[in-house]
Amino acid sequence: MTNHSMARELYVDAGECTGGEYCVDSLPAVFRMGGGGVSEVVDPGGATEREIQEVIDNCPAGCIHWNR
């Protein structure tokens, strides 16, 4: 189930990202590897907030955040 009306903005802090690809492997509909070997958000509606929060909580670099 996807959620296309999230009230919060999802982003990856490129300065904190180590390029481990945990987020990309876990939610490829939401994240992809971008330039410079860091991940980026491509479709925050590609997963539920709960699924995304699980990836945020388990990201080894702690670089994925919600912007309120």
Image (cartoon, rainbow, N blue to C red):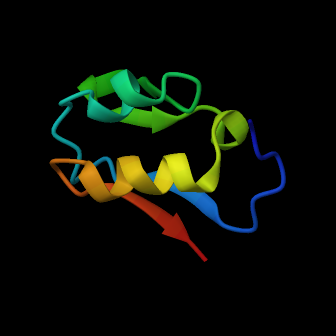
Left or right side of 8 for 10:
left
Name the residue nearer the viewer: 35 or 53. 53
User: Residue drawn 58% across and 24% down?
Assistant: 29
Screen quadrant of the C terminus: bottom right
User: Residue drawn 15% across and 48% down?
Assistant: 60
Left or right side of 57 for 50:
right
Name the residue nearer the viewer: 13 or 28. 28
User: Residue drawn 25% across and 24% down?
Assistant: 37
The location of residue 25, given as percent across then percent down, is 35, 22
User: Residue drawn 36% across and 35% down?
Assistant: 23
- The extreme bottom residue here reads 68
Left or right side of 37 for 66:
right
Residue 8, by quadrant, is: bottom right
Q: Is residue 25 above or below residue 47?
A: above
Badge count: 0
The location of residue 2, given as percent across then percent down, is 75, 38
Q: Is residue 46 above or below residue 63?
A: above
Name the residue nearer the viewer: 4 or 19. 4
The location of residue 18, given as percent across then percent down, is 15, 39
The location of residue 36, given as percent across then percent down, is 27, 26
